[in-house]
Image (cartoon, helix red, strand yellow):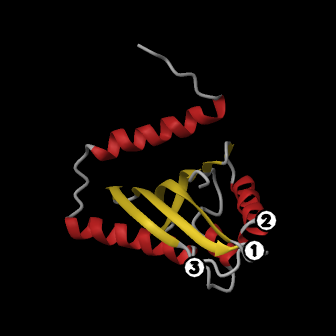
């Protein structure tokens, strides 16, 4: 048996995600197909709305997907954040250095799958691309894959764990 040593800061998030999958996935949650579809549609609409590049405050939309308090684990760009404050700083940095500099961007969701695990947990895996023009007018595309674990907290679906990976540059 091969053992993989995880960095200390990833042990709890990985254990928590594993417990959600192990406990909820095989259990009879009592959800009907319509209830699962409603939850999946709610999450899909919430994510797409948060990334509406025509909104007056795109940054606030992106941040609205995360709980206002408590831990939130995010792996992106080779780094891991574990608090709302550190995640918010990373999202702000992306928006200030990349997002605001895109000209005529169009967010395209190329796939989106939402697996409802229980009445209070779901996992979304999606791919996306954002064709746009650079500040100098050159065509450019960013994109990637994103997996997010959602929990229903205070009546709202929020991301508690996520991993984003960028698509390779062409």
Identify the residue at horizontal 34%, vertical 60% (top origin). 119
Q: Is residue 36 left or right of residue 48?
A: left
Identify the residue at horizontal 65%, vertical 35% (top origin). 9
Residue 61 drawn at (x, y percent): 62, 75
Residue 135 drawn at (x, y percent): 78, 75
Q: Is residue 31 above or below residue 147?
A: below
Residue lying farthest to the top in this orientation: 1
Q: Which mark is residue 100?
A: 1
Residue to which mark 3 is pinned: 52
Q: Is residue 43 left or right of residue 143?
A: left
Nearer to the camera, 143 or 47: 143
Residue 118 drawn at (x, y percent): 33, 55
Mark 3 or mark 2, which has the lower sequence index?
3
Q: Between tags 3 and 2, which lies in front?
A: 2
Q: How many marks?
A: 3
Q: Is residue 155 visible?
A: no
Identify the residue at horizontal 55%, vertical 53% (top origin). 160
Q: Which quadrant, please, contains the N terminus?
A: top left
Q: Which mark is residue 47?
A: none
Mark 3 or mark 1, which has the lower sequence index?
3
Q: Which quadrant, please, contains the C terminus?
A: bottom right
Residue to which mark 2 is pinned: 97
For residue 143, which quarter of the picture?
Answer: bottom right
Q: Is residue 102 above or below residue 153?
A: below
Nearer to the camera, 147 or 98: 98
Mark 2 neighbour class, 10 Å CA radius: few under 14, some 14 to 19, many 20 or more: few
Identify the residue at horizontal 40%, vertical 73% (top origin). 42
């Amino acid at each position: 048996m091969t053992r993989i040593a995880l960095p200390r800061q990833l042990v709890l998030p990985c254990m928590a995600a594993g417990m959600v999958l192990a406990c909820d996935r095989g259990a009879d949650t009592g959800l009907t197909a319509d209830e699962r579809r409603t939850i999946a549609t709610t999450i899909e609409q919430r994510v797409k709305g948060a990334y509406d590049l025509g909104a007056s405050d795109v940054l606030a939309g992106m941040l609205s997907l995360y709980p206002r308090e408590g831990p939130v684990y995010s792996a992106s760009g080779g780094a891991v954040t574990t608090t709302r404050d550190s995640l918010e700083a990373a999202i702000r940095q992306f928006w200030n250095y990349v997002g605001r500099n895109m000209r005529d961007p169009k967010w395209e969701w190329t796939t989106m799958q939402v697996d409802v695990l229980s009445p209070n947990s779901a996992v979304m895996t999606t791919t996306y691309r954002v064709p746009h023009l650079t500040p100098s007018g050159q065509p450019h595309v960013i994109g990637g894959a994103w997996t997010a674990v959602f929990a229903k907290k205070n009546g709202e679906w929020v991301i508690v764990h996520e991993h984003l990976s960028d698509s390779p540059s062409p």
